[in-house]
Amino acid sequence: MLTDKTLEEIKLEKSEAFNKIMLESSPDCLKILDVEGRLQFMNFNGLCQMEIDDFNHFKNQVWWDLWGDENKNLVKQSVETALQGKATEFSAFCPTAKGNPRWWHITITPVGSPTNGIYQLLSVSRDITAQKKAEDEIIALNNSLEEKVKIRTEELLDKNIQLEKTNIELATFNRIVSHDLQEPLRKIQMFSKLILEKEKNIDESHVHFNRILKSTDRMRNLIDAIHNFSISKHSKVIFENCDLNEVLVDITDYFSHIIEQKKATITIDDLPVVKASKILITQVIINILDNALKYSKNDIAPSIHITAEVINSNEFQIPVATTSDSFYAITIKDNGIGFKDEYKYQIFEVFKRLHSKDEFLGTGIGLAICKTIIENHGGWIEGKSNVDIGSQFIIYLPKN
């Protein structure tokens, strides 16, 4: 007759056999851990998925030591939670025994009895590598889409800014056409009528003729200025090696008459060779020097000093998009009447004048042309000034 002990042993063996059948029938990687977190068992499918040829090499090893430094604490904390009687789960990366990458979703369930408490843990590891790869691809696609949307949004914002600038310029052109160009035409018409009415008075006719000529000159200057500005906005820059020393020789020769007339002095330091359009850069410097000579003091001869230096882009905040890490800074400094510092941005706006046309000749478009040309070269221009002390304009051009 069988003893109670033998019956209990038979019952336990049957239970263990049944459990083993259940573990081996699972398609997932199943492991049994003891209460110290050491591996005691792994089913056949688990050995295959983990690419383990001999489980004896892993048996009794602490499980979290097999996960790598980045996941060791996560696994250890999950095991400790399960040992407190609470099932837990997590997802993490762990390569197979042969080093092939795998992502796993882990469920840890405590196993125990009312009398003995928790005596082991059951870990179910499901291979989610394909799912993780699909998720990563979706994330990558979303990030790519977000980046494209961001780029497109920035492009649209930039186009909106350009459109707003264009609208402002069109409004200014409308003002020019409706007022500034109409004004000399009205004067031409008015003085012509006066001449016809009083043609016998030769002296008075001469006065009217001079006013007509002055009005036609102003209208011609405005038309030329609008034309030049339009060209500078849309002209394609053809870059070439441009020696600024040679450019200044030609420019000072161009201004030789007014330099002699005003007894002006122009000193020029050694200037660099830049990658630029020689024609356009020449126009920029001509405009700036023309202002320096025009807005000079009545009782002091104009003195203009032109210098150049190399500056690194990390030394200041660059106001334009650029790939250059250094720039040539060409400074043109004068001792003229200057202007208030509050106007240092407005002076580069189209048709912005700080003085009336009766005080100084000009259209108020020259510096706007300079700004457009330099920006088309990948640089920028700024002005600094003090009233009655003088002004300086700094042209920044990419060095490389």
Image: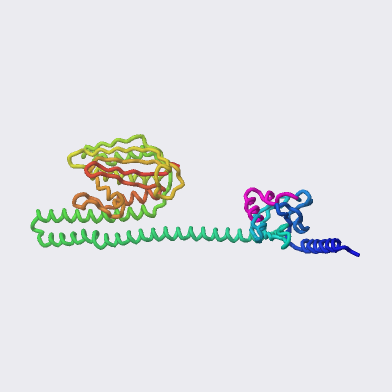
Residue projecting furthest to the right: 1
The residue positioned 28% from the left and 37% from the top of the image is 266
Q: Is residue 83 left or right of residue 191?
A: right
Q: Nearer the viewer, residue 52 or 164?
A: 52
In magenta segment, residue 319:
no
The secondary structure that most of the magenta stretch takes on is helix
Q: How many numbered marks have been drawn onto this rendered protein structure?
A: 0
Whole-percent x, y for residue 259 in the image: 24, 39
The residue positioned 79% from the left and 50% from the top of the image is 56
Q: Quadrant of the N terminus?
A: bottom right
Q: Is residue 118 left or right of residue 301?
A: right
Q: Quadrant of the C terminus?
A: top left
Q: Nearer the viewer, residue 1 or 244?
A: 1
In magenta segment, residue 67:
yes
Residue 276 location, quadrant: top left
Q: Is residue 259 left or right of residue 44?
A: left
Whole-percent x, y for residue 295 in the image: 23, 45
For the magenta stretch, what is the residue range?
Answer: 60-79
Can the viewer see residue 122?
no
The residue positioned 33% from the left and 49% from the top of the image is 370
Whole-percent x, y for residue 176 in the image: 27, 59
Can the viewer see residue 32?
yes
